Image: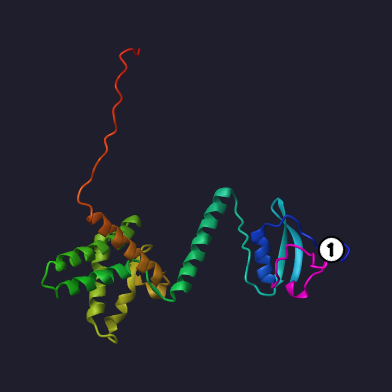
Amino acid sequence: MFAEAGAVTVTRVPKDDARRIARGCGASVLTTLATLDGDEAVDVGALGSAELVEQVRLSDDDVVVVRGAREQHAATVILRGANDYMLDEMERSFHDSLCAVKRVLESGSVVPGGGAVEVALDIYLESFATTLGSREQLAIVEFANALLSIPKQLAVNAAKDSIELVAKLRAYHAAAQNAAPDAPRSHLKNYGLDLHEGKLRDNVKAGVLEPAMSKIKMLKSATEAAINILRIDDMIKLVPEQQAEDPHAHM
């Protein structure tokens, strides 16, 4: 029927691909053309539209390309590389970038990266701890110091002087938190590590940003893990049973 009408027919299309094409073209997926009267018919409202449908050859495969879909809810990205290893790395990097964009859109806000958030929290919590006159002060100070392990590890991984960089970064954020909102030093709150040059920079201007949602979830997960570990009072170790030697065994 389709061939007689001059329509292109594609067989053995995966269900997920069929749903994506239908969503992009503004169509509906039909499992049958049969009607209740026993005839065959197609509802015009279930049809979609696109500017061009063509068959092209990519590498060793023939694929059908749909261009100019009406709704544009789906797109296909073609990755090309010299070998499978490079393609796997490209796919992983592209997937990570899509996940980062997704997190930003879900969160609706971003924070400077490069250890800026962790150092800012460290300075704030140390200042807050001095207002307490109880033993909670010690716990807050230790939690603040634990946050510094993230920028320190970032610097170590980049083969930079972690002690010097983190010390300068703490001084910057301490000055920013003690300054007025319109003071010249208030912009120092956006400073983080520049792991390429081994110095500090305004990571908001440099575009080194992190989704606020991911940062909050990371801190919550790490805190909950530490709490669960601290709740453990003792450990019971199960020693595996030793098998008795067979006196009849021969070496």
Q: Is residue 192 above or below residue 60?
A: below
- Residue visible at 37% across and 66% down? 217
Q: Is residue 172 shown left or right of residue 32?
A: left
Assign a secondary structure to mark 1.
loop
Q: Is residue 90 left or right of residue 226?
A: right
Quarter that holds the C terminus: top left
Horizontal placement of 101 versus 125: left or right?
right
Percent from the top left, x then y, of residue 110? 40, 74
- In this view of the protein, which residue sits in the foreground, 42 or 61? 42
Q: Residue at x 28, y 85 (%)?
A: 181
On the question of residue 154 being in view, the answer is yes
Q: Is 10 a magenta residue?
A: no
Question: Dot 1: within a 10 Å radius of its alpha carbon, few (fewer than 14), some, or many (20 or more) residues?
Answer: few
Residue 182: quadrant of the picture:
bottom left
Q: Residue placed farthest to the front in the image?
A: 37
Q: Amino acid at mark 1?
A: Phe
Q: Which residue is mark 1?
A: 2
The residue range painted magenta reads 26-48
Q: Quadrant of the N terminus?
A: bottom right
Q: On screen, 178 above or below 89? A: below
